[in-house]
Image (cartoon, helix red, strand yellow):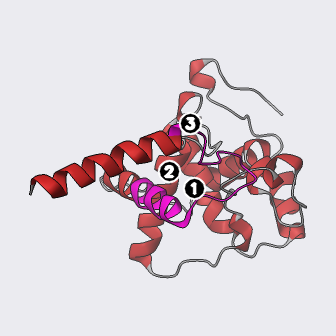
Amino acid sequence: MKTILSLLLASFVLGIIALGSGAYNMAATEKHWKITEKLIEWVRDSSIKARAEDLTVPLLEDTELLAQGAEHYNAMCTICHLAPGMKPTELSAGLYPQAPIFHQRETTTDETKRMEHAKAYFWVIKNGLKMTAMPAWGLSHDDQAIWGMVAFIFKLGHMTPEQYENLINSTQSHAHGGEDNGHGHSH
């Protein structure tokens, strides 16, 4: 038993020395080691699920919620997550991990999965994600605004550029931001 513990300790110390020497490349132009990527995904997904599971999802089909979400998405999210018909931006191209491109995702028809995704999207939008460039919009936007973005993300699946532009143009008079906390701004 002592031999096994000694080997584990020696392996741990060697691992720390190797990582501290710069052996692991932190550049965004290099992918993580497969084991690192799997570990990060597992920790991220487990963390989000544990914190989002008790959320109550509002009616995501509400037209005012969708309009608010469309405007927020257009103003805040397209630089990383893009929009239908939009080419990658300099910022989106340089992100690692890459931000999800929601208009290219398949729509979820399973209602249980849809609610799980809604809760996870809400939690991530509100709280952000460490080391991904995803900001915590909950610091400047209320829950209603964040649920609006979630509702809009669900509508983005396979939306055409024309449909996107029509929806965005129909919401231009809507105020943007967390007006209740002084962080809002208008377009």
Is there CB contact under 8 Å for labels 3 and 2?
Answer: no
- Residue 20 seen in the figure: yes
Instruction: Tell me, yes or no, whether the highlighted magenta stretch contains residue 40.
Output: yes
Front position in the image: 85 or 66: 85
Query: Mark 1: few, some, or many residues within 10 Å (few <14, many ≥20)?
Result: many
The residue most toward the front is 3
**Marks 1/2: CA–CA distance:** 6 Å
Location of the N terminus by quadrant is bottom left
In the rendered image, which residue does mark 3 sit on?
Answer: 136
Per the image, label 2 sits on a secondary structure element best described as helix
- Which mark is first along the chain, 2 or 3? 2
Query: Residue 16 at x, y = what percent?
Result: 43, 41
Amino acid on which the number 3 mark rests in the picture: Ala
- Residue 113 as seen in the image, left or right of residue 180: left
**Marks 3/1: CA–CA distance:** 14 Å
Q: Is 114 above or below relative to 166?
A: below
Amino acid on which the number 2 mark rests in the picture: Phe
In the rendered image, which residue does mark 1 sit on?
Answer: 150
Q: Is 101 above or below relative to 6?
A: below
Query: Mark 3: few, some, or many residues within 10 Å (few <14, many ≥20)?
Result: some
Query: Residue 44 at x, y = what percent?
Result: 44, 54
Q: Residue visible at 57% across and 20% down?
A: 181
Q: Residue visible at 46% across and 40% down?
A: 17
- Residue 170 seen in the figure: no
Instruction: Tell me, yes or no, whether the highlighted magenta stretch contains residue 146.
Output: no
- Which mark is first along the chain, 2 or 1? 2
Q: Give the range drawn in magenta.
A: 20-45
Amino acid on which the number 1 mark rests in the picture: Val
Per the image, label 1 sits on a secondary structure element best described as helix
Front position in the image: 62 or 4: 4
